[in-house]
Amino acid sequence: MSDSAANAIVFACNWDGLSSVEAAGQARLSYPASVRVVRINCLSRLNHGMILKAFELGARGVLLIGCEPGRCRFDSDAALVARELEKAKGALRLLGMREERLVMGRVPPGDGAGFVQQVTAFVAVLDKMQSASSAWLR
């Protein structure tokens, strides 16, 4: 992987998120090779410590892909996911890192094109931030 490639971790829920990843693969849609998808049963099971660990291990950005509002198979509270996201963003601020490196996205089930579009746009933002090296950490 080249130095200019943006290493992005995508935490995808097992239902709508992962079905979109699979649909993208079945349709032979491509997204940047530097993206790593991690299946998680539900985004409500993801805590801010796991998100921050991805950054600690070298991720330049983290994208959370979950179900559309009201479609969660576990009837999880969307506010719970939002609270964990805000905790992680708060920690990023304390570390002097830009909040734009952590993004939440939603996709309908099986929307491969939507998944690819969100991931590609996210990686483009990471590339743009990195090219403006003075703004990378800030």
Image (tube, helix red, strand yellow):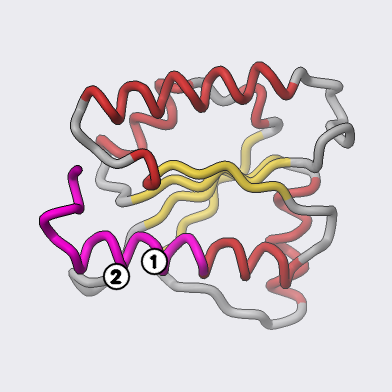
Magenta segment includes 84? no
Height in image: 137 above or below 95?
below
Height in image: 57 above or below 92?
below
Q: Residues within 10 Å of mark 1 (few under 14, many from 20)?
A: some
Amino acid type, callout 1: Ser
Height in image: 126 above or below 64?
below
Of 94 and 37, nearer the camera is: 94
Tell me which corner region of the image, top left, top right, bottom left or bottom right, holds residue 75. Answer: top right
Element type at marker 1?
loop
For image coordinates 62% across by 43% down, the residue present is: 39
Residue 28 is left or right of residue 48, and the answer is right
**Residue 129, position as x, y percentages in the image:** 27, 60
Residue 134 is left or right of residue 57, and the answer is left
Tell me which corner region of the image, top left, top right, bottom left or bottom right, holds residue 28. Answer: bottom right
Residue 60 is left or right of residue 108, and the answer is left
Q: Residues within 10 Å of mark 2 (few under 14, many from 20)?
A: some
Magenta stretch, overall SS: helix
Tag 2 and tag 1, C-beta contact below 8 Å: yes
Residue projecting furthest to the bottom: 28
Label number found at residue 5 = 2
Q: Which residues are magenta?
A: 121-138
Label number found at residue 34 = 1
**Residue 25, position as x, y percentages in the image:** 69, 73
Of 42 and 67, nearer the camera is: 67
Element type at marker 2?
loop
- Location of the N terminus (image quadrant): bottom left
Magenta segment includes 129? yes
